[in-house]
Image (spheres, rainbow, N blue to C red):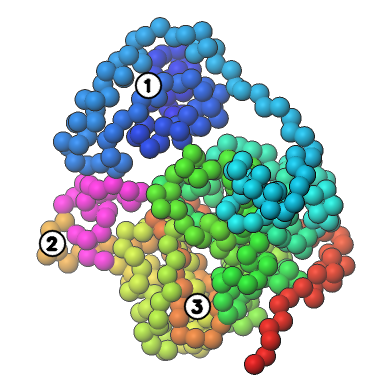
């Protein structure tokens, strides 16, 4: 859509072709660029099609509309399209019972399918005690529709998600990460590939905010892990404008978009934590973001260093080619460290030995997807191999999880230039008092 609009800006006619399932997405993109009346032709060529007959049939069916769009005289509203101005919303948009509130918000597309907490004035004011920044302060613009994420808007979505004021400083850092161009949110949040934001929390804030980094860290059951991820999902949707089936065109979607938050078990790790690797001080608190679209739990092949490393290299999905996070328990990390392994050494080892025969790697044929294509033809009996992950820089090692012999692997084919983005968590001046207020809020399970 942006290409078609750029051509129109040069006073040349343009027609954008959109698969029939993406026309609404195209109109949203055009409206966001200030040209809601750009010509869009709905066509039936299957996505990523490499079957010539199917492509030819779709092109023939659309050709008449393409010619008409390029030759017909523009209507007055098309010659000077105007962005639709929205009325300023009322401060109080709803009064009613909790069930009525949830149905009202759900019908307007402001929720995520689960019940919401009402963002009353009192609740938002309490949430705002989690930062020293003013409510009108703009943290950043959130793609794809470039909504301005003010502190107040972040707080409203945090309340709706059930977050606590002790989570707000973390959420602000998360928004800063989303707004960083290196994160590629505009692509990942709207792609058919259903990438999920994977949030890693480091530093002292893990303890005060009760971010789980032990057993079942990514299970339901912890307010911090659940509500932080859920709040960020609402922020991407309500502020950024990535709405399911309109801008977010995930083919299947991804359950990780509800919440995928974990801390690092720094005290039990033999290595420097992730945020230190990313350039921050050990006593800083920080959040790291990247976008995988696959997560696997894998049983270790052996409890020694050879078995642990073999588990990692033989479970990399061929063709993923994106940012990759290797999750291991403190026990597994200590086993590797005792044998002299460091995080950089592990990253290099997985890159060098996580390989597939070249003729089986998606880079060696002319298929679709994000992977880099190669013009060479590789014979099926060739001994050449190809690295699954492009470089050690695409890999991070995270120590987390409880006792057991499983390991974790978060990965997914990614965009060129995508990076792990880390932002510092800036705590408010009243942090000690705020943390003490909510410290006792933790589940106490009945003993059998």
Of label 1 and label 2, which has the lower sequence position? 1
Q: Is residue 362 magenta?
A: yes
In this view, the residue in front, 326 or 345, is 326
In this view, the residue in front, 119 or 48, is 119
Pointer 1 residue = 15
The residue located at (27%, 53%) in the rendering is: 363
Quadrant into which the N terminus falls: top left
Magenta highlight range:
356-377
Pointer 3 residue = 328
The residue located at (31%, 19%) in the rendering is: 65
Cα separation between marks 1 and 3: 50 Å
State left or right for residue 394 relative to residue 354: right
| Residue 165 visible in the displayed image | yes
User: Of helix, strand and loop, which mostly describes the magenta segment?
Assistant: loop
In this view, the residue in front, 227 or 325, is 227
Cα separation between marks 3 and 2: 35 Å
State left or right for residue 434 relative to residue 278: right
| Residue 132 visible in the displayed image | no
Q: Position of residue 329 (x, y in %)?
A: 52, 81
Q: Residue 20, located in which quarter of the rendered image?
A: top left
């Amino acid at each position: 859509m942006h290409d078609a609009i750029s051509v129109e800006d040069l006073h040349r006619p343009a027609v954008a072709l959109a698969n029939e399932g993406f026309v609404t997405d195209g109109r949203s993109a055009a409206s966001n660029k200030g040209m809601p009346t750009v010509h869009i032709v709905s066509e039936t060529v299957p996505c990523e099609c490499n079957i010539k007959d199917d492509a030819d049939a779709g092109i023939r069916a659309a050709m008449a509309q393409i010619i008409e769009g390029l030759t017909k005289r523009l209507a007055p509203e098309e010659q000077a399209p105007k962005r639709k101005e929205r009325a300023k919303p009322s401060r109080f948009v709803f009064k009613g019972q909790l069930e009525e509130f949830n149905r009202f918000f759900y019908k307007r597309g402001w929720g995520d399918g689960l019940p919401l907490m009402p963002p009353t004035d009192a609740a938002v004011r309490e949430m705002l005690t989690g930062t020293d920044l003013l409510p009108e302060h703009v943290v950043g613009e959130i793609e794809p529709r470039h909504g301005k994420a003010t502190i107040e808007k972040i707080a409203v979505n945090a309340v709706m998600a059930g977050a606590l004021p002790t989570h707000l400083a973390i959420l602000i850092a998360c928004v800063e990460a989303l707004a960083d161009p290196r994160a590629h949110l505009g692509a990942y949040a709207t792609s058919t590939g259903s990438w999920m934001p994977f949030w890693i929390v480091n530093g002292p804030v893990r303890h005060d905010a009760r971010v789980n980094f032990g057993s079942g860290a990514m299970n339901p059951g912890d307010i911090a892990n659940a509500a932080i991820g859920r709040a960020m999902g609402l922020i991407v949707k309500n502020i950024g404008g990535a709405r399911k089936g309109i801008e977010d065109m995930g083919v299947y979607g991804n359950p990780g978009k509800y919440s995928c938050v974990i801390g690092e078990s720094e005290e039990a790790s033999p290595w420097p934590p992730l945020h230190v690797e990313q350039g921050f001080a050990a006593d800083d608190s920080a959040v790291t973001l990247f976008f995988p679209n696959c997560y696997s739990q894998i049983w270790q092949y052996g409890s020694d260093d050879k078995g642990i490393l073999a588990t990692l290299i033989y479970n990399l999905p061929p063709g993923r080619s994106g940012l990759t996070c290797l999750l291991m328990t403190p026990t597994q990390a200590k086993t590797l460290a005792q044998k002299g392994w460091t995080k950089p050494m592990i990253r290099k080892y997985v890159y060098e030995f996580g390989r597939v025969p070249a003729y089986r790697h998606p880079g060696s044929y002319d298929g679709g997807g994000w992977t880099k294509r190669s013009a060479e033809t590789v014979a099926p009996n060739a001994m050449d191999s190809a690295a699954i992950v492009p470089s050690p820089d695409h890999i991070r090692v995270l120590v987390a999880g409880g006792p057991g012999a499983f390991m974790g692997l978060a990965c997914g084919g990614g965009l060129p230039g995508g990076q792990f983005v880390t932002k510092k968590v800036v705590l408010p001046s009243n942090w000690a008092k705020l943390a003490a207020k909510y410290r006792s809020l933790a589940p106490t399970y009945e003993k059998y």
